Structure formats: C-alpha cells, structure tokens
Amino acid sequence: MSEVKVSAFSVSLDGFGAGPHQSHENPLGVRGRELHEWFFKTAVFLARHGAAGGGSHGVDNDFAARSFENVGAWILGRNMFGPVRGPWLEDSWKGWWGEKPPFHVPVVVLTHHARAPLVIKGGTTFYFVTEGPEAALRQIKDAAAGEDVRVGGGVATIRQYLTAGAVDEVHLAFSPVLLGEGENLFAGINLPKLGFRPVSTTAGDGATHVLLTRC
Amino acid sequence: MSEVKVSAFSVSLDGFGAGPHQSHENPLGVRGRELHEWFFKTAVFLARHGAAGGGSHGVDNDFAARSFENVGAWILGRNMFGPVRGPWLEDSWKGWWGEKPPFHVPVVVLTHHARAPLVIKGGTTFYFVTEGPEAALRQIKDAAAGEDVRVGGGVATIRQYLTAGAVDEVHLAFSPVLLGEGENLFAGINLPKLGFRPVSTTAGDGATHVLLTRC
C-alpha cells in the first residue's frame, strides 16, 4: 500500500533539522550542512550527483538507498525549493538543484503563490500547490501512482504533516552534531501521542538511524 | 584535575530526561523508567544493588562503569532526593534509595529548606545546601577531595549547572524511546554556545552514548 514517509531526515542531537538564518548562501541554515555529512559521504548520494564509483557502502549508505526506494512523489516546503519569497516574479528559479534535481518523479512544492508546473529533463516535474498541505497530499498521492509519497522537508513542512497525522513512517538520522539553535523537529510535538514508536536503532559511521512507525 | 561531570544521563530521542508528573509512584515521571532500561540491565547497576554476577558486559556496561569512576562527590536536585516538598517536616525520608544509597561519597542536595546532614552507613552523607547551586558546588568540591563532582540530576539541576558554564563533560545515553512530554534537557539551552562539542558516539545494545566536552 502507498505510504507517506519521512526518510533520511537528518537531525542534530539536540533535535534541530536545520540551522538558523536560512539564506541563498546557507540553504540549510547556518551549520545545517553538518547534519547531512553522513549522507554526502554515501555512494548513493555521490551516484545521484554524478560521481558514481565513490562513496561509502555501509549502514549509512543502506539507509540512503532505502530512502529513495519506492518513492513515487515528493512533497517539499517552499524554502526547501528555494530562497525566493513572495510571488514568483520570474520563473528563472528552478530549485536549489538547478538543471539536475535528484527527484526524477513528481514533486509538490507548497506555496502561497501560483506558478505553472515546471518540467525538468530527467523525470522531475515541480507542481506548485497553493491549496494547503492536505490538498497537496491528495494531489500528489494520485501522481505517485501507488508508490510512496516522501515528505522531504523542511522542518516546518514535516512538522505540519506529522501533526496532521498524515505520516506513516519516519526515518531520522541523528548526526553527532549540536546546533543549539535553528528549526527544532520535536518542540511542541508529542510523537507518542501521534502513535509513533521507535522500532529500530542502527549505528552508522556518520549517523545513528532511528526508524519510527505508527502502531 | 577535578572536573564537574554529568554522566550516564539518559535522554529520550526527543530530548526528555524525565517524564511528566513526577510522584512518589513515578520518581522519574510517567514512563521515565524507560529511559534507564539500558542501565538497569548492566552488571554495574546490578552489582551496586546487591545482585552481583548478573547483567550485561558490553558498551552499556562500560559506560555505566565509567560514570562511577573517580567520582568524589555528587550534586542532586531536591526532586532527585525525594518527593517531599516544602520544609522537612520530619527527617524520616532518607532518599529514594532508603538504607542503601548507591553513592558511598558526600552528596549535596539542593534545597530551600535547611536540614542537618544525613549520614548513612556505607559512606554516603547527604548535605542539604540552601545557599544556591554555586555555593553548593564550591562546598562539594572541597568534599570531593580532588576527585570529580558528578551532577546527578534531575533535568532542572543539570540545566542550571550547564547554563552557568560549570560543567566540563557530559555523557548522554540516548535511549530508543520517545516521551513526547516531560522535562526537556535541551530546550532553550544552546550547548555549542556554552562551548560543548560531541567528541564520540558509541552504540550500545540499549542506548547510544554521546560524549560532549568543552573546547
């Protein structure tokens, strides 16, 4: 059955999924990149970014690979698509990834400002949905054609879908990093009350992977 | 040199060091015991509670053993000593541990209410200090006779000493548990700003052990 998943989502030991002060220079916020070091080192990441042959092949890589399996569509918050705020004044911004987004499937971008779908070579089409997260999930479920929907982030978007009870599985990668400030994934969210339980903890070289499912 | 340490301090994946609604029945708050399952299973814990011969001998046990090494004195918040609130109406309460506290060294209990020192067979003496955490630390450092001072808890007490910049090393045991509510160790505390960095992450059977030191 098609599920809604959060996968390979990196958090700091103190619960932050992004650093503070997101900007064009710091898409993940200040020090946010450190959360993802485990992922950047994997063979899966390098292969998807054109550097096949390199990278790690252990636990971290297994979880990186798993995070792309059976994903039929993605949901992203607008900040995860780009630094542009307000109306789309011009359509030159094609996402942080430029001409080579790593998705290769339909991607919904949550926004308050309408924009025509953006088709990029390689199978990625960005749909800009203005009717809110619930409507976005309905639309993208159809587009996922029976496969899973992956809520990619950022933190605010994941919190929104968690709180709405719309997420079936969460894979968190705890990085050995303290951020101290930024966007906290857990603050004010009671995951056990939402039905989540940890079902496994697996140590990788660069992160500790925790799988949460709803019971 | 004598250091001030937090050791073997168990936290949930979502950052809680105790559950909500601490009471006589739930000294660690509701579901708080689950945070410490890794510790209860160790040979070190069982030996200290009169069940020598049993228990685990892996990573978790190594960290449990380490947490008692070179400890010359402890500091505890009042809630960690007992459920009694307000003035000590009578002196029958001798701590959650009764006649067999696991300390065997001087222990400072932070309180607003004076009480004579409580000497218990086996080397544990509880000193009730009313002059605040800073004065308590000064006094107990003398009593530690060159060994380390371990800040045992609870969460509020540890947060107090962390924020004051008085702690040199923190060993956190992340248990595979989500609490959702309770006493959060990290909320509103910027550990990197206080100088802390993670220096190691070690996976045990029952918890992931993270060592933070100040640089």
Image (cartoon, coloured by chain):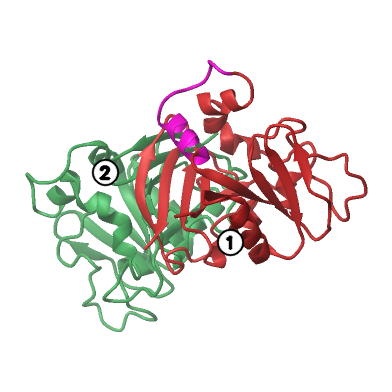
Chain colours: A red, B green
* Chain on which label 2 sits: B
Judge depth for marks 2 and 1 and give the one in front: 1
Rendered view: B7 above or below B96: above
Q: Secondary structure at mark 1?
A: helix
Whether pointer 2 and pointer 1 mark residues with C-beta atoms closer than 8 Å, the reply is no
What distance separates the C-alpha of mark 2 from that of mark 1? 39 Å
Kindly identify the residue that appears in the image at 74 percent across and 51 percent down. Answer: A127
Please report the bounds of the magenta region as a residue range: A52-68
Kindly identify the residue that appears in the image at 49 percent across and 55 percent down. Answer: A3
Residue B64, labelled with which disc? 2
Where residue B63 sits: x, y (%)? 29, 40
Kindly identify the residue that appears in the image at 48 percent across and 57 percent down. Answer: B185
* Chain on which label 1 sits: A
Residue A203, labelled with which disc? none
Where residue A52 sits: x, y (%)? 57, 18
Residue A161, labelled with which disc? 1
Residue A9 can be seen in this image: no
What kind of residue is marked 1? Answer: Tyr
Residue B31 can be seen in this image: yes
Kindly identify the residue that appears in the image at 64 percent across and 56 percent down. Answer: A157
Where residue B61 sits: x, y (%)? 23, 41
Of residue B170 and residue A78, the one placed in the foreground of this image is A78
Q: Name the residue furthest bottom.
A: B89
Determine if marks 2 and 1 fall on one subunit.
no
